[in-house]
Amino acid sequence: MIPRLLICLLALGGALQTHAQAQNDYKSPYSVSFSFKDEELIGDLIKGPRGDWKDQATVPFREWYNPSNQARWRHYGPSAKHFNPPAGLATKSPEWSRERVIATGLRFVGYTYQHHHIPDWEPPADWPKSPDQKSPVGKGLDCSNFTAFVYNLALGIKPTGDVQDQSELTTVAGPGPNRTIPVKRIELPKSHADFERTLMTGDLLYVKNTKGSLSHVVLWVGKIGKAPDGYPLILDSTGTGGRDADGNEIPDGIQLRPFKPTNWYFTQASHALRIIPEGQ
């Protein structure tokens, strides 16, 4: 099948349009080329009930902003429901699953960095705030709740949203409730150039902070990413964006970002986890 270049960040229209306007009208120079048609890859998210943002949580939408839940949920909001596996998952190739994870994640580009469990939860002004929240409160996810939600929505595989616990997984719940599958730990190469040969699209790459504590996780986009400067791409949610190939500041929140030999994604990289197997 002929790859289709989906310039999902250069325009907000089309099948992969995001749910929110990118901050400050940011135009990304990065894109992703998939080997499957939109309808085959995420048709159920584009048109089906799986894409209904009001059906993301373990509680009905009418309960999302019930004041009685403030003390229990705090700034995280309601927990994400565990989605069933998409129809026909057992017959799909690992390549399809890897690309579906990235295509699902791209649907949330433009959401801000928020300590929430589900992306479309937008708490009222009087709701408890995260003590370290820097962005204005709105729709969004933090790094590990983003990776957890994307795997859950895409494949019915539900990692924990705690970044440290997620980084230590040896098994993960799914696909769908009442099942588990193994998780493979990937030790990283020392050379920046070898990352592309070691990691696969959809792998979870974990990053340490400057104090040496594990603090961040990103989705590895890999060979399907397209960057004018030739660097590999990652997809993540972070409070600081860095600069893109055009020299522009990347907004906080969920965006495609370059994996450069000079940025912290590489210099502070810890290890990776592979949820989707190499082959069948």
Image: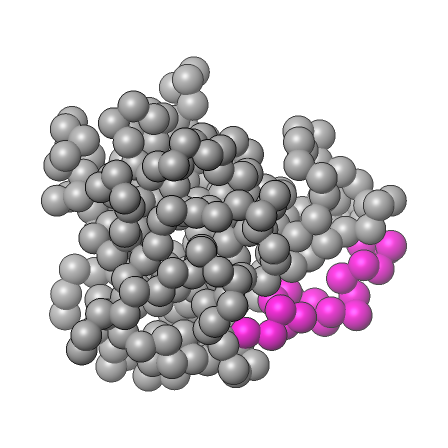
Image quadrant containing the N terminus: bottom left
Q: Nearer the viewer, residue 272 or 200?
A: 200
Is 63 magenta? The answer is yes
Q: Nearer the viewer, residue 48 or 57?
A: 48
Q: Residue furthest top?
A: 211
Which residue is depicted at the point 34% across and 45% down? 234
Which residue is depicted at the point 30% across and 65% down? 5
Q: Is residue 280 above or below residue 259?
A: below
Q: Residue furthest front?
A: 246
Position in image of residue 232 (x %, y %): 25, 43
Q: From this viewpoint, is residue 248 visible?
A: yes
Q: Is residue 38 left or right of residue 69?
A: left
Q: Is residue 231 left or right of residue 67?
A: left
User: What residue span does the magenta drawing correspond to?
Assistant: 51-69
Indicate the quadrant where residue 19 lies.
bottom right
Q: Is residue 187 left or right of residue 66?
A: left
Position in image of residue 163 (x %, y %): 46, 39
Which residue is depicted at the point 75% across and 38% down? 129
Indicate the quadrant where residue 262 lies.
top left
